[in-house]
Amino acid sequence: MTFLKILWDNLRKGPSTEAFPFGEATTPAGYRGKVTFDAATCVGCNMCEHVCAAGAIRFAEADDGLHFVIWHNTCVSCGLCAYYCPTKAIKLSNDWHLSHLQQDKYTQLDHGVVAYKRCTSCGDKLLPTGSVLTQLAYKGPNPRAERLMDLCPECRRKASTRGEAI
Amino acid sequence: MIKDTLWTLLAVVVFPGGLFAMALGLALKGVERRAIARLQRRVGPPLVQPFYDLVKLMRKRTLIPDTANRFVFLTVPLIGLAAMGVAAAMIPIPGFYQPSPLLGDLIVLFYLVSVPAVALMLAGSASGSPYGAIGFSREMAIVLAYEGPILLSLVAVALHAGAAMGQPIALNLSDIVNYQQQHGAFLFDPWLLPAFLTYLSFIPANLGIAPFDIPEAEAEVLEGPLVEYSGPPLGLLKLTSAIKSVVVIGLGVALFFPNGPDGIAGLVVFALKCVVMVLAGALLKAAVGRMRIDQAVLFYLKWPELLGVAGLVLVAARL
Amino acid sequence: MNFFSTAAKKSPWLYRINAGSCNGCDVELATTACIPRYDVERLGCQYCGSPKHADIVLITGPLTARVKDRVLRVFDEIPDPKVTVAVGICPISGGVFRESYAIEGPIDRYLPVDVNVPGCPPRPQAIIEGIAMAIEIWAKRT
């Protein structure tokens, strides 16, 4: 007769249904939802594209910078990109409001441009190296490396050879 | 004579058959769905949900399978609905409505109550689908199992009421109701307790309430006989089952507990009795799973049959 | 909006088609009906067993080559008007199976999809959100 007690308890406690879609739904803070990308901290290592299980992430080079594109309609929210991103430029937010009409299917994109910097010496373009990466590499501020950061690889090599960076 | 016929026709089409029974039956379905949802800690659909469903089905396209017998496929829902309209008009609403004797007696009613089951069987076999065929065979098995006990129960009540009124057997439902209103309900008569229990056990099988909703099991045989139906015919079949719940519960009320006030209050009390029965059915539906067809048939052939025979013997012994 | 579409909006019956899904999305679909927390029935929805009773069809899976013909056949058996919802990333884009020789998807190459619910699998609330979108379309079609 325990089932009668369970049913009675169910009646007594009332519905446990969430208000959604008429109200707000609860979302755990750690829920793996929509991928967010921060172009300012990305260093263009392409690791996320390499590890992406579903091929949702693409990088493309253009004149103005490195273009990052993610198509949410093929992302499996596995979190590998966020795990392998050295500077944590990719994160998984807990936003799950991804349902959309068919005509919006191919606009479910997030697009970011990692803009090229100009080499202060020769004017050639180079990918910016954020302070997050130097922090990771040198465990603290490093004046020597920071002097080389605004140079293109070629000029950096020359500068190093001339001993300017020492 | 013509006036009588017109009144009878009105009873079949508008009140208490036809429109009224449809409205009450659909409302009862809504109450049932809501009650089950509450028992499972859900909010559940609104009470008028079955009306919405019906209106929607009336607008959907009707698909007829190539393998189906077109004529039988389309007429069977109408047969079930017509039988139930007439049957609903034969159920007295104590203190409010007395069926015209033109419509027939308890025996006719007994046969009319089994017509929807036959219609469902025909629907299943006419649809030409293997699921429909399985639903057909299951419906057939369970009908054979529960028709015996229900007949025994009806005969016991009719004999008892007849003996009390000085007739060999009372086959007029109005007489049975009137007798109970004067001398107390049969529900509280210990001699008729087995007959009452038999009737009670017949309700879930006839109305497709778990654990006996085997012919229309949506999880195993995709709602069995209804599998190929769509649009208005499906709506009619759902409507038939809604009216059937009014008829079967109303017959139980008339046979065992028709006592209540006169006038409109009588109608309200009748509806309340129906709601109480439906709530009990919802409790059963929410609490138990589904039996296998062989278990259900064995169950009906054992216990309700035994109870029915016991009830009949008890009543016959006092004659 | 007339009387019929008002009623129809409150009574969309759901039907699931598994087009070669891994069952993840199907489990999430089942939770929307079976777990009291999500309770899709309060929108008037009801999962039905037969395609002929359906109004909103929820398709999961990347449409594998073996299942393609069956899916198209079952889809044709759903009476009009109907609304199609692609649940999970597999029917939408192919997901991790995209460009595999074993799949024929994405599903909108063969079927008219109306609403997409991405996720692998989408959480039940996301499915309910998609169903709510589909109901809006469904009310316009009846």
Image (cartoon, coloured by chain):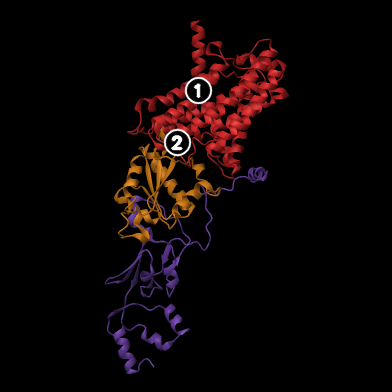
Chain colours: A purple, B red, C orange
Comparing B148 with A54, the one in front is: B148
Query: Is residue B127 found left or right of A123 in the rendered image?
Result: right
Q: CA distance from mark 2 to mark 1?
A: 24 Å
Where A93 falls versus A86 (above or below)? above
Q: Residues within 10 Å of mark 1 (few under 14, many from 20)?
A: many
Question: Can see residue B58?
Answer: no
Which quadrant holds residue A121?
bottom left
Coordinates of residue B185 in the picture (x, y in percent)? 69, 21
Question: How many numbered marks does the figure carry?
Answer: 2
Coordinates of residue A38 in the picture (x, y in percent)? 41, 69
Residue denoted by label 2:
B134
Query: Is residue B194 found left or right of A137 in the rendered image?
Result: right
On the same chain: label 2 and label 1? yes
* Quarter of the figure that contains the C terminus of chain B: top right
Which quadrant holds residue B192?
top right
Coordinates of residue B45 in the picture (x, y in percent)? 53, 39
Where C18 falls versus B108 (above or below)? below
Kind of element beneath mark 2: helix
Amino acid on which disc 1 is placed? Met
Comparing A40 with A55, the one in front is: A55
Image point 41% across, 73% down: which residue?
A41
Image point 30% across, 90% down: which residue?
A158
Comparing B107 with B271, the one in front is: B107
Coordinates of residue A89 in the picture (x, y in percent)? 42, 71
Protein chain holding label 1: B
Question: Can see residue B217?
Answer: yes
Residue B193, disc? none
Image point 42% across, 65% down: which residue?
A36
Q: Residues within 10 Å of mark 2 (few under 14, many from 20)?
A: some
Residue denoted by label 1:
B84
